[in-house]
Amino acid sequence: MPEAPEVRTGQAPRKLARQEFHLQFMRSFKDPTFDAAREALAQVEEIAWQNYDASRKAPVTQKAGGEFADPDYDLSVEWKATRDKLIAAEQRQKDPRSKSRVLLIIGAARNDGTCPGEISKTYRMALWASEVLEAAGIDADVLDLSLLTSSYDLHIHPCKGCVSTAMPLCHWPCSCYPNHGERQTNDWMAEIYEKWVAAHGVIILTPTYWYQAPSVLKLMIDRLVCADGGNPDPTTTHGKKAAEAKEIERKGWDYPKHLAGRAYGLVVHGDVAGVESLRRNLGEWLDWMGLIDAGKQSALDRYLGYYESYADSHATLDQDEKFQEEVRNVARSVAAAVQQLRAGRLGKPDALVMPARPK
């Protein structure tokens, strides 16, 4: 009989002591305008301390019910609401009567509502793509990730790597957040998952930062790991019980691809280096998740103002009419692919071939 899986522990730091918690809590209230509310803040702090000390991750729960493996498990109300929205979005997406929908993702961190004081070039590209899609009778849903840098208390919290302990520990949608005891709340991914599920196609438009995807885009990418093999039933692991998840994976896991079959396109640009490798990395990631590339003209990597002035980059974009048309061609390619997908004329040729290494 195989031994029970070992769960390795010992890395996590100790919890904050009460005074340490006080100092950390009050860092959000340095503005002198809060001085008039010090007594009220002290009351809120005490409650926050108690919640932190008791590790109150999901304080509002309901019994899971008969649709889950353990009907009596206390399931997070917030997670259940997100999950129910994904089921409804999937039903709309698969309804042949629904209007086609493409998700346009702006991967730049810059906008004129924060420190840079100017819109990103990527935003302009998304507008061109949106016009093409709307002209083709397709709804364009714009996801501007730069809002993370300019919106009040909006977050994409980082992936905690549950999948590396065991795939069934990574829930679909992610159940790591919100964690109220740790004040890890207002997680935007609950809405972003729904946008991905509702889409028939996805176009990622992004600049290249230091050879890599901008941090706002990478945060979203990491949190989409649960879409590729994630467990849709947290009651099977009774929340985050690592040993239970390991046992399930040992018995065999089918790694469900929750976003497979959607079309995709890419627009990657930069002014120094790294655009080709980033475009390739994004394409291979989307291929891995089972999305379908929309053809040769749907994946674009280009330099704008190569080693030229940052200050004139928008003017450079104004002058590069060929690039502007290439961006529109990415949208045209994805629009054509979505139409073919919905008509049943396009799919992955190897969709029914079982991989030798499903992980």
Image (cartoon, rainbow, N blue to C red):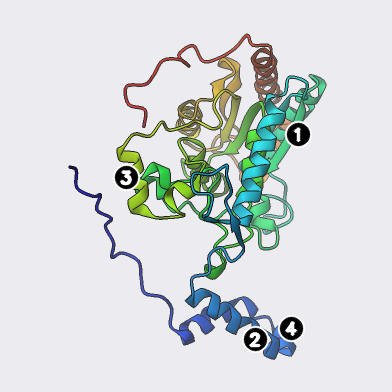
Disc 2 target residue:
43
| Of the two numbered discs 2 and 4 in the rendering, the one whose residue sits closer to the viewer | 2
Front-lying residue, 196 or 314: 196
Disc 2 crowd rating (10 Å Cα; few below 14, some 14-19, many 20+) is few
Q: Secondary structure at mark 2?
A: helix
The label number, if any, that marks residue 167 in the structure image: none
Identify which amino acid the numbered label 2 is placed on. Gln
Identify which amino acid the numbered label 1 is placed on. Leu
Residue 312 visible to an observer of this rendering: no
Identify which amino acid the numbered label 3 is placed on. Glu
Identify which amino acid the numbered label 4 is placed on. Thr
In the image, residue 141 lies at what x, y percent? 73, 35
Which quadrant does the C terminus fall into? top left
Sequence-first disc among 3 and 4: 4
Q: Give how far apart the Cα atoms at labels 2 and 1 are.
A: 47 Å
Q: Secondary structure at mark 1?
A: helix
Q: Quadrant of residue 179?
A: bottom right
| Of the two numbered discs 2 and 1 in the rendering, the one whose residue sits closer to the viewer | 2
Q: Give how far apart the Cα atoms at labels 1 and 3 are.
A: 48 Å
Left or right: residue 307 versus residue 84 is: left
Q: Please determine whether, in this image, residue 353 is positioned above or below residue 138.
A: above
| Of the two numbered discs 1 and 3 in the rendering, the one whose residue sits closer to the viewer | 3
Sequence-first disc among 2 and 1: 2
Find out whether the residues at labels 2 and 1 contact each other: C-beta distance under 8 Å.
Answer: no
Q: Which residue is located at x 69 percent, y 36 percent?
A: 88
Disc 3 crowd rating (10 Å Cα; few below 14, some 14-19, many 20+) is some
Sequence-first disc among 1 and 4: 4
Q: Give how far apart the Cα atoms at labels 2 and 4 are.
A: 17 Å
Disc 1 target residue:
127
Disc 4 target residue:
33
Sequence-first disc among 2 and 3: 2
